[in-house]
Image (cartoon, rainbow, N blue to C red):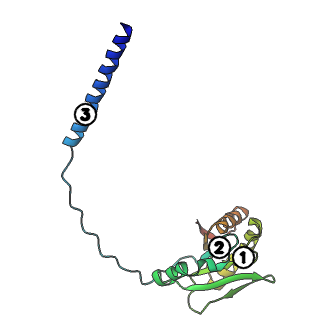
Amino acid sequence: MKREHSKRTERAFRNTAVVIVLLVVIAGCASVRKPVAMPHAPAIVEVQATTVAYPLVLLHGIGQKAHVWEGAALDSYRNVLGLHFGGVMTFSGGTVKITGYNGGPRDFFTVSFSNPTDSVAGWSKELERYIAEVRRVTGADEVTLVGYSMGGIAARHYLTKHLRDHHVRRLITI
């Protein structure tokens, strides 16, 4: 008797649940509005030139060099955004050297850390020199760092070691 009663109660509960769901669906359908036509989007206009407030410094990942940015990335910066390449920075003999610069504005730079498998702390110390050099050659007070993989980690490490004097406006990690 108890078993039959519990089966009836369960069946009634299920039926009630089904009815409630149907009522909710029907009520929802009744409130559906007719679709409204979306306005046409304006035509896409290619950017002719972009200016950057702070020079970009592109940092590669572990086991790589600045060449990781060559190809589509650099072409996009140059041709799509209209930015000017400031050169590839390397550190050797205690000084930063810049190659590949052809004159004009310097909107973005790439970095080749001297040891592509060095520690985060090692890259962070080197990054300090690169930032100082970018500031020197551009006259900018701050830079924007774009770090790929370990380049981003080294940049973050650099910021934590230079809380009040990092000269970094933004850090973008990929």
Q: Quadrant of residue 150?
A: bottom right
Q: Which mark is residue 22?
A: 3
Q: Secondary structure at mark 1?
A: loop
The Cα atoms of the two marked residues, 3 and 2, are separated by 57 Å
Q: Position of residue 104 (x, y in %)?
A: 56, 91
Q: Position of residue 74 (x, y in %)?
A: 55, 81
- In this view, the mark in front (1 or 3): 3
Few, some or many C-alpha atoms within 10 Å of disc 1 (few <14, some 14-19, many ≥20)?
many
Amino acid type for the residue under numbered disc 2 = His
Q: Secondary structure at mark 3?
A: helix
Q: Which residue is denoted by mark 2 in the rendering?
A: 60
Which one is earlier in the sequence, the residue at label 3 or at label 2? 3
The Cα atoms of the two marked residues, 1 and 3, are separated by 65 Å
* Residue lying at 59% horizontally and 93% vertically, measured from the top left: 103
Q: Nearer the viewer, residue 56 or 173?
A: 173
| Figure check: 26 above or below 144 | above
- In this view, the mark in front (3 or 2): 3
Q: CB atoms at circles 1 and 2 under 8 Å apart?
A: yes
Q: Which residue is denoted by mark 1 in the rendering?
A: 113
Q: Quadrant of residue 23?
A: top left
Which one is earlier in the sequence, the residue at label 1 or at label 2? 2
